[in-house]
């Protein structure tokens, strides 16, 4: 299990610019839950993808405090070169195994199988937004859970649009 830092584009997180090398939190207080440089591990990385899509390995961390399972903070981090998200899912034998581990791994798969897409959407309908061309069966699985899924489906079929309209009108 490796430790990693997840970053958004531009590699800025809470006002701090990260990159390869050392980053220091000037106002670190180990007892303040908002203070520190936060990081996770490769077993929990998929829970934090909402924070960004850039992954850097944590080479060194100072004054480490575990905040929750898979969530740590430190006063300083030394980060390595950026890794691709795909490298994190390479440890799984199949797309389905990756999605079974965590539904949001679907966003890390270049060409997920229809079975993996369906498994991800059935586990969490919001994952439909990470699938570039979902087949109609996958679209339907998402819309069944929430008609609002239609907003995140790229090029929904006319039938799926109609089903979503029907379901939304039933809520009104």
Image (spheres, grey):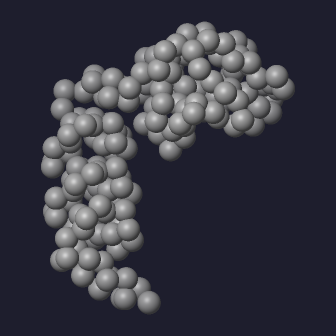
Tell me which residue sits at (19%, 27%) in the image.
Answer: 93
Between residue 28 and residue 68, name the one nearer to us. 28
Instruction: Report if residue 150 is visible in the image.
Output: yes
Q: Position of residue 19 (x, y in %)?
A: 59, 20
Instruction: Report if residue 70 is visible in the image.
Output: no
Q: How many marks?
A: 0
Would you place residue 124 above or below residue 60 in this image? below
Left of 169 or right of it: where is 17? Answer: right
Q: On the rendered image, what quadrant is the C terminus found in? A: bottom left
Tell me which residue sits at (21%, 42%) in the image.
Answer: 112
Q: Position of residue 95 (x, y in %)?
A: 21, 36
Q: Quadrant of residue 159?
A: bottom left
Q: Position of residue 65 (x, y in %)?
A: 68, 22
Tell me which residue sits at (80%, 29%) in the image.
Answer: 31
Between residue 132 and residue 92, name the one nearer to us. 132
Left of 82 or right of it: where is 64? Answer: right
Would you place residue 140 above or below residue 44 in this image? below
Q: Quadrant of residue 24?
A: top right
Would you place residue 97 above or below residue 172 in this image? above
Q: Quadrant of residue 21?
A: top right
Q: Position of residue 169 (x, y in %)?
A: 37, 88
Left of 157 or right of it: where is 44? Answer: right
Q: On the rendered image, what quadrant is the N terminus found in? A: top left
Tell me which residue sits at (19%, 70%) in the image.
Answer: 157
């Amino acid at each position: 299990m490796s430790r990693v830092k997840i970053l958004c584009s531009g590699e800025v997180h809470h006002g701090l610019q990260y990159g390869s090398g050392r980053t220091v939190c000037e106002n670190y207080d180990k007892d303040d839950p908002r203070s520190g440089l936060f990081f996770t591990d490769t077993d929990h990385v998929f829970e934090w993808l909402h924070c960004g899509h850039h992954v850097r390995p944590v080479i060194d961390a100072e004054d480490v405090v575990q905040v929750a399972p898979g969530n740590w903070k430190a006063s300083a981090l030394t980060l390595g070169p950026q890794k691709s998200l795909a490298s994190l899912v390479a440890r799984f034998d199949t797309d389905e195994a990756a999605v079974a581990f965590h539904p949001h791994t679907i966003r890390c798969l270049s060409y997920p199988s229809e079975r993996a897409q369906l498994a991800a959407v059935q586990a969490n309908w919001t994952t439909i937004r990470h699938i570039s061309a979902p087949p109609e069966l996958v679209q339907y699985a998402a819309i069944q859970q929430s008609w609002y899924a239609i907003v995140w489906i790229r090029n929904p079929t006319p039938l799926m649009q109609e089903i979503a309209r029907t379901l939304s009108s039933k809520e009104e």
